[in-house]
Amino acid sequence: MKIKDLRVHSIAMADPPLRSSYGLHQPYALRTILEIESEEGVVGIAETYGGAEPAKALLAIRERLLGNSPLRALGLSRELLREDASGMARSQTTLVPGENPLDADARTYAALETACLDLAGKTWQVPLSDLLGGMVREKASFSAYPFYKHAGGGGEGEDSRKDEYGEALCPISLAEQAERMVGQYGFREIKLKAGVLEPEAEIETIRELRRRFGPGVPLRIDPNCAWSVDTSVKVGLALAEELSNGGYLEDPTSGLEGMSEVRKRLLAEGVDTPLASNVSVTSFGDLPEAVGLDAVQVVLCDHHYWGGFRQVQHLAKICETFGLGLSMHSNNHLGVSMMAMAQVAVATPHLTYACDTHYPWQTERDEVVAGGRVPIAGGVIEPGHAPGLGVELDPDRLAEASELYRSIPYRKRDDEAEMRKYVDPDWKRTLPRW
Ligand code: MG
């Protein structure tokens, strides 16, 4: 099982005009597909962040992998996991995930690990979850991920997609969007992307969700650091009941010290809503301070930038040891990432919340896996026992997505520029905004 070829495909997919505190999603999101082929002709695959840089980084390790077994290739690439920066230097407070040069090596390693383990699993005819220690559950739970958004389904001009969800820029339209999403996929937990409207309107949105879904559906809110400590405490107090029982308050403010202060002040008022983060804790080096300051009670992992599946499993063990919860962050992705997330989710014992996924925001038309989109039913994905990741690429779909990438001008994610282009020419991301 020696590697004889490594191929990298830059692809694009339509993305609706979703809002967050970073700005506005561009009409296309970019991804990279990696293929690693063995001398026996078996192909392992991975999906990661897109644009020029991730593709270049994967091509840069090509020569050293050729002729090695996929598992040996991982050993030879371990230096990509070194951590020489953590804390605010590495955090995603100011940079969107996938655009942070400080975790670029971890992202490269993660893609390599995914493709190598997929290749090994397909060669040995075992599911990837077996290579991660074996399944501890059959189903991976995901949560609905409603966003405030403008009208439009993504894409541009003749390539525009149908707008499945419509505009949602107020509590009622957002709740309707969530109902539609839950109706279609059966999600049993809901996470609201916030940091877009005035905090009062976002509090009202959570209350509207609670009215419609009842207390049996846990609710979460993630304003991506848009709030000051005072505003975070105000929202935390206002939503004490709605965010209890399986909910959390995610990255309300920037930095571990700010998070710690929010936690202290909420506890002093008798509110123990956990604080979650995928912004202030993005690497192992962030954990000592996060734990020491009691700044974060739920870490949102992401195998794409934490350095792969086994790093996520190490993280899970640390979280369990220190009494932290663990869930999973997501960015726009297609079916290869979807299955990768599901495989690690079913093989990681300490995973305490339904994981995030942007998958409902993408459509069948942009999917690159053979047989079409990975099904989510009842809010879960069952990765099953098929070899490796459990999905293959559709070469025609991959060629179309690559052609789409070549035909569009976007080469990196820039939500701020998009916001200035379509919403407010003077818009700047300021933290805290409220
Ligand atoms: Mg987040």
Image (cartoon, rainbow, N blue to C red):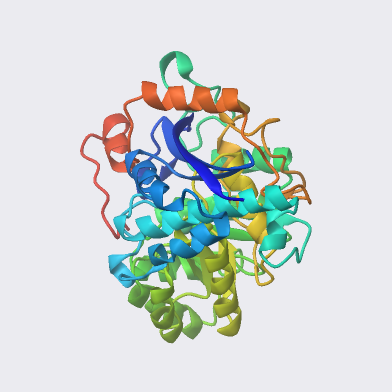
Q: How many marks?
A: 0
Residue 140 location (% of width, % of height)? 71, 56
Q: Nearer the viewer, residue 14 or 146?
A: 14
Q: Quadrant of the C terminus?
A: bottom left
List the single residue furthest toward the left.
426
Q: Is there any visible trace of residue 308 in the rendered image?
A: no
**Above or below: residue 236 compared with residue 382:** below
List the single residue furthest toward the top.
158
Q: Does 139 sit left or right of 63 as displayed? A: right
Q: Does 83 sit left or right of 146 as displayed? A: left
Q: Is there any visible trace of residue 168 in the rendered image?
A: yes
Q: Does 262 sit left or right of 342 as displayed? A: left
Q: Nearer the viewer, residue 5 or 345?
A: 5
Residue 90 location (% of width, % of height)? 32, 65
Residue 141 location (% of width, % of height)? 70, 56
Query: Looking at the rendering, which quadrant does residue 279 occupy?
Result: bottom left
**Above or below: residue 420 compared with residue 318:** above
Q: Nearer the viewer, residue 284 or 213?
A: 284
The residue drawn where x is 71% and y is 37% is: 184
Q: Nearer the viewer, residue 396 or 416?
A: 396
The residue drawn where x is 52% and y is 67% is: 311
Residue 251 location (% of width, % of height)? 43, 64
**Above or below: residue 190 compared with residue 368:** below
Q: Does 84 sit left or right of 246 as displayed? A: left
